[in-house]
Image: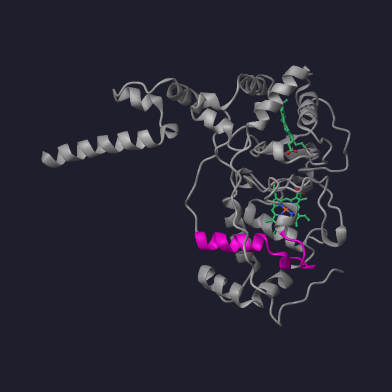
Amino acid sequence: MKIMEFTAISCFLAFVVINGAMPAFSTAGGLIDMGYGSRGGSMGAGSARSQEPIRPIPISFDWDIAKIELGKKLFFEPRLSKSGWISCNSCHNLSTGGSDNLTSSIGHKWMFGPINAPTVLNAKFNLAQFWDGRAKDLKEQAKGPIANPMEMASNHELAVSVLQSIPEYVQWFIEIYGDAKINIDNVADAIAAFEETLTTPNSRFDSWLNGYDEKISESEKEGYNLFKDKGCINCHNGFGAGGNSFQKFGVVKPYNKDTQTLGRYNVTKNEEDKYVFKVPLLRNIALTAPYFHDASAWNLSEAVNVMAEYQLGVTLTDDETGKIVAFLRTLTGDQPSIIFPMLPPSTANTPKPDRN
Ligand code: HEC
Ligand code: HEC
């Protein structure tokens, strides 16, 4: 009996403490049902918003720190490129929203890539990677750029032999993968583990979803309602406000500014997949101009109007466009704070950089 009472009291206290400490994560329903009374307007609103089609970015701490630290070094490691100069961060600059803000990236020998670089932030929420979804996940994706002649222009053997020549790397790979022989799968696995941490929670919009009414203004809220009412939400939803389906660019009107890039068709070879692309994430969209796979829009109003015209067949008033843009700006979250990694020096055995 005593034990029962003690347990009941501790449970009750724990409940109060947890709810007191984390109002944003509890629901009004639970509290009211248990007879503890309402906790005020913001909680009620929070529970209503659990049905919203955009979901707050979850905060995760379930990380293998050693692996992530290795992945971070590799993400910043220019010696994975043939020139010894280009790293993942060159094109997915974590100081500028995980993208390069260029029309198309500058790769090996100053070569221009064929397509705008998407951000790596929140990429874990994508149903597949790349505009055409040709890599099934982050690990598969990470092997691509190292060996892409227009990007890092190395090959997997060369990239691995660089790491293998540096004793610190060998030691880290032993500690994490139990193998002194480094291989490209493990390189990609570590980079992907680091990328998994590159999420941006706590945007003002997410706080609003969690019940904090004051976090977004009236016109931002109206922008969100327009985003839903006009139909943007049909494609841009979930954690990333996008990233979870492939859709045609030019649903109601053929998109004619770029007819060279075939999108998903390259993967499936189905005629109906021509000009179909992975719906981009709209998280941190204010940071990642220019927009679209062909970088044809440099400001958000323009991008929103193009979407309205080509995807929905509607014309927005300037006021409506302005409000939708204002809403989109509330999707900028906490950027990952990165301690710049120190990379171990090359040795006499390290293959020399080659800019040709
Ligand atoms: C020279 C510039 C460049 C470098 C270097 C580069 N990337 Fe990219 N990255 C791109 C471009 C361009 C795309 C889009 C290509 C496409 O979709 O066809 C891309 C796509 C991606 C994507 C998919 C995102 C999405 O939304 O589909 C991820 C993830 C990514 N890169 C991670 C990396 C990693 C990890 C490295 C280092 C191993 C790296 N990139 C190196 C330019 C670069
Ligand atoms: C039928 C699906 C669909 C609808 C509806 C839709 N979008 Fe998109 N959206 C896409 C696709 C696909 C792309 C990528 C187009 C491309 O670049 O190839 C995209 C791209 C974007 C981009 C650029 C993202 C980037 O990183 O380059 C923005 C901004 C955007 N949409 C906002 C909106 C807004 C606002 C609406 C409503 C007015 C809307 N979208 C309606 C599918 C859709």
Residue 326: in sight, yes or no? yes
- Residue 287 picture location, percent across and down: 71, 40
- Identify the coloring: one colour
- Residue 147 picture location, percent across and down: 76, 63
The rendered magenta stretch, by its main secondary structure, is classed as helix
Residue at (46% x, 23% y) in the render: 42
Q: Is residue 314 left or right of residue 194?
A: right
- Residue 6 picture location, percent across and down: 17, 40
Residue at (74% x, 56% y) in the render: 90
Query: For the magenta stretch, what is the residue range?
Result: 65-87
Residue 235: in sight, yes or no? no
Identify whether 157 is placed above or below 88: below
Q: Is residue 311 left or right of residue 225?
A: right
Q: Is residue 318 left or right of residue 259?
A: left
State the quadrant of the N terminus.
top left
Residue at (57% x, 56% y) in the render: 193
